[in-house]
Image (cartoon, helix red, strand yellow):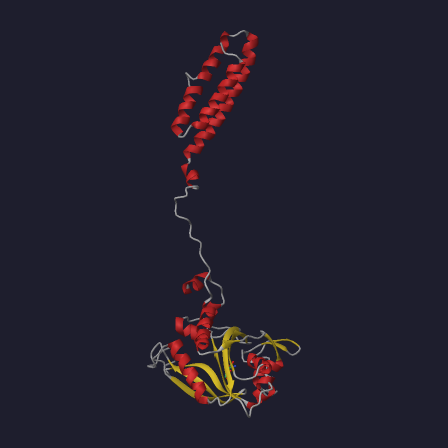
Amino acid sequence: MSNLDDVAKLKVEFIERLGNADSLDSVNDLQIKYLGRKGILTAILKGLKDLPSEERKVIGAAANRVRIELEQIIKQAQEKFAYPEEISLFDPTLPGTSQKRGVIHIVNQVIEDICSIFQRMGFKIATGPNIETDYYNFGALNFPPDHPARDLQDTFFVEGDRLLRTHTTPVQSRYLEKNQPPIKIITPGICFRHEAISTRSHIAFHQVDGFLVDENVSMADLKGALVAFCKAFFGEDTKLKFRTHYFPFTEPSAEIDISCYLCSGKGCQVCKYSGWLEILGCGMIHPNVLEMAGIDSEKYTGYAFGMGVERPAMLKYKINDIRLFFNNDARFLRQFE
Ligand code: DAH
């Protein structure tokens, strides 16, 4: 006849067998074997009526407790086998979820393109501060005190004579002050202007300036370098047009237009049907600029140029709104992987 020991043993035996069960079917078999109508535990419970009343009470209570326990762990085992996807989480043969990698911002890619073309011509990179003084942004570049570019309308003044640089040209003065020719530098960086934000202009944008100072540098050297750059960046068939212009820091000064490479100069919406696109300013460095930086302008001459980055990027990648560069919309930025 059953006694307390039998009930305890039965529980141990059951738990061990359940631990070895490897499918829902084997768990169900165990359930029938122990707890079914003709199950082992059921038989013990049925046999209680034949026991003396003292024993019946004690063994009956123990057997009932074990029945409740077994029912619980059986239920857990059944659930484990009934939801195989939980197990599949650990399936090492499934393909992994791909992790998206970041991309280099399109503006930085274009800056790298521009710089690498000049680096191949022997230019080295120099940079300067984004917050400039009035002197380096204007004075050292030969801007007269009453030049309109110094107006609050165009420049963000920070404090005292400090301002957010309106171009990357101040790096030229800083560099010339500290170095003697021969000098061959390009200066990529961000600039700021107090403009109304629109599809075509933004308060923050990027420029790359370049300058070369040595003995006997002429406008022909400038032309050679810029023709080579434009063909490398915009395409071998690109034509250039030098238009005279005015900048306080160069004399003579010019602006360069390239033949519109969307319509090859035939005329389209982008070039406003002129066939030409204005892309950079340039000239021979003004002797005053060299002298203010401590370079002998009798002995040395130099050329300089400066271009925006966003505009050529918009042309090259057919982007119609400059604001897209700065909105940080990943859907836009990811296109340039
Ligand atoms: N700094 C000028 C601008 O922001 C661009 C420029 C023109 C830079 C002529 C130069 C240069 O170095 O020689 O419009």
Q: Is residue 214 above or below residue 205?
A: below
Between 316 and 120, the one lying in front of the other is 120
Q: Residue furthest right?
A: 160
Query: From this viewpoint, which residue is outermost toward the bottom?
Result: 298
The relative height of residue 202 versus residue 283 in the rendered view (above or below) is above
Residue 1 in the image, given as x and y percentages of width and height? 49, 9
Q: Nearer the viewer, residue 163 or 140?
A: 140
User: Residue at the location (50% across, 21% down)?
Assistant: 11
Residue 29, x across and y down, in percent:
40, 23
Determine whether 267 is above or below 93 in the image: below
Q: Quarter of the image for the C terminus: give it.
A: bottom left
Q: What count of labels does the image hold?
A: 0
At a point 36% along the width and 80% down the height, the residue shown is 238
Which residue is painted at 51% across and 24% down in the image? 69
Q: Position of residue 138 (x, y in %)?
A: 59, 83
Q: Position of residue 267 (x, y in %)?
A: 34, 81
The quarter of the picture where residue 99 lies is bottom left
User: Is residue 74 rendered to the left or right of residue 146?
Assistant: left
Q: Based on the displayed image, in which of its 4 quarters is residue 94 positioned? A: top left
